[in-house]
Image (spheres, grey):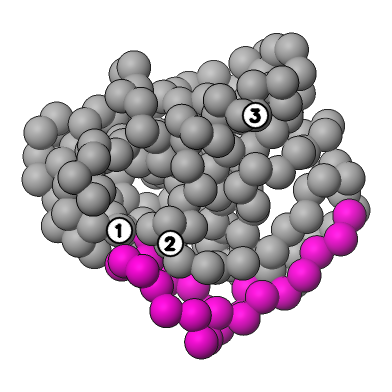
C-alpha cells in the first residue's frame, strides 16, 4: 500500500477548516487494500474521496460490493475538535451504532451558493451529541464535537468522515461507500468535500 506525505503549509482553506491540520500529514492510498502491518508515522491523516478500497469494508452493513469511498476522512487524535466549515443549522443527529458504521453522527444543512447542501460529520464522540437540537444554528468555525474512539465510532481509528450531499438525507445517515457500478450517480449526489476543505491533497 503506497502512502505519501502532504504538506498544507501553503494551501489556503476555502472555508473554516473542519480539523486544524498541521503543516505535515499523511495521505493514505487504500487502492490496494489495507495493510495491517503498517503503522502511520503521523498523527494526522487524510483518506481520499472517490477511492476504490478493496477489502476494507467487511462488516455486515456493507453487503454486496460497496467499496468506493465517497467522503473524505480526516484522521487525528481522539478528542480532536471538529468544526463547521461555514454557517448552517443542525439538520439531524444520532448514533449509527452498527459495527463499521459512523457511531455518533451530526448532519448540518448549509446554503452553498444558493443551493441546499447537507454535510455529514461521522465517527464523533458521544459527548458531541450533548446539548444540540434540530434547527440549532451553527456559526462558521463553531466546534460541532470531537473525534470518538473505537468503542463508540464503529470500530475505526479516530477520524471524521466528512461527506457532502446535494440530496436531502433520511435521518442521520448517508452511504459512505457505494458500489462502483453506482459511481456516476454517487459523485453527482455526493460532491467532493474539497469544494469546502480546499486542496488538502
Name the residue carrying label 3: 183
Contact flag, marks 2 and 1 (Cβ < 8 Å): yes
Residue at image location 80% in from the left, 64% down from the top:
3
Q: Is residue 103 in view from this perspective?
A: no
Q: Which residues are magenta?
A: 1-25
Q: Secondary structure at mark 1?
A: loop
Residue at 34% over, 17% down: 170
Number of the label disc, if any, that sits on residue 85: 1
Callout in the foreground (2, 3):
3
Please state if 157 lies on the left or on the right of 132 as rendered. Answer: right
Question: Residue 116 — which label?
Answer: none
* 101 or 167, nearer to the observer: 167
User: How far apart are the alpha carbons under marks 1 and 3?
Assistant: 26 Å
Q: Is 20 inside the magenta-drawn segment?
A: yes
Who comes first in sequence, dot 2 or dot 3?
A: 3
Q: Main secondary structure of the magenta part?
A: loop
Work out whether mark 2 precedes mark 1 in sequence or the reverse, and give the earlier one.
1
Q: Which residue is mark 2?
A: 197
Q: Where's the C terminus, which quadrant?
A: bottom right
Inspect this view and state whether residue 95 appears: yes
At a point 31% along the width and 37% down the height, the residue shown is: 118
What residue do we see at 54% from left, 56% from top?
Answer: 74
Amino acid at each position: 500500500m503506497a502512502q505519501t506525505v502532504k504538506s498544507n503549509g501553503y494551501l489556503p482553506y476555502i472555508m473554516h477548516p473542519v480539523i486544524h491540520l498541521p503543516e505535515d500529514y499523511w495521505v493514505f492510498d487504500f487502492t490496494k487494500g489495507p495493510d495491517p502491518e503498517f503503522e502511520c508515522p503521523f498523527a494526522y491523516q487524510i483518506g481520499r474521496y472517490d477511492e476504490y478500497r478493496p477489502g476494507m469494508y467487511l462488516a455486515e452493513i456493507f453487503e454486496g460490493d460497496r467499496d468506493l469511498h465517497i467522503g473524505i476522512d480526516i484522521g487525528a487524535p481522539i478528542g480532536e475538535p471538529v468544526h463547521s466549515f461555514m454557517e448552517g443549522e443542525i439538520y439531524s443527529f444520532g448514533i449509527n451504532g452498527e459495527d463499521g458504521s459512523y457511531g455518533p453522527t451530526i448532519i448540518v444543512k448549509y446554503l452553498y451558493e444558493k443551493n441546499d447542501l447537507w454535510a455529514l460529520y461521522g465517527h464523533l464522540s458521544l459527548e458531541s451529541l450533548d446539548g444540540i437540537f434540530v434547527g440549532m444554528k451553527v456559526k462558521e468555525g463553531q466546534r460541532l464535537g470531537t473525534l470518538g474512539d473505537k468503542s463508540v465510532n464503529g470500530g475505526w481509528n479516530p477520524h471524521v468522515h466528512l461527506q457532502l450531499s446535494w440530496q436531502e438525507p433520511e435521518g442521520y445517515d448517508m452511504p459512505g461507500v457505494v458500489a462502483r457500478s453506482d459511481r456516476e450517480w454517487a459523485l453527482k449526489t455526493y460532491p467532493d468535500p474539497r469544494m469546502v476543505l480546499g486542496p488538502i491533497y
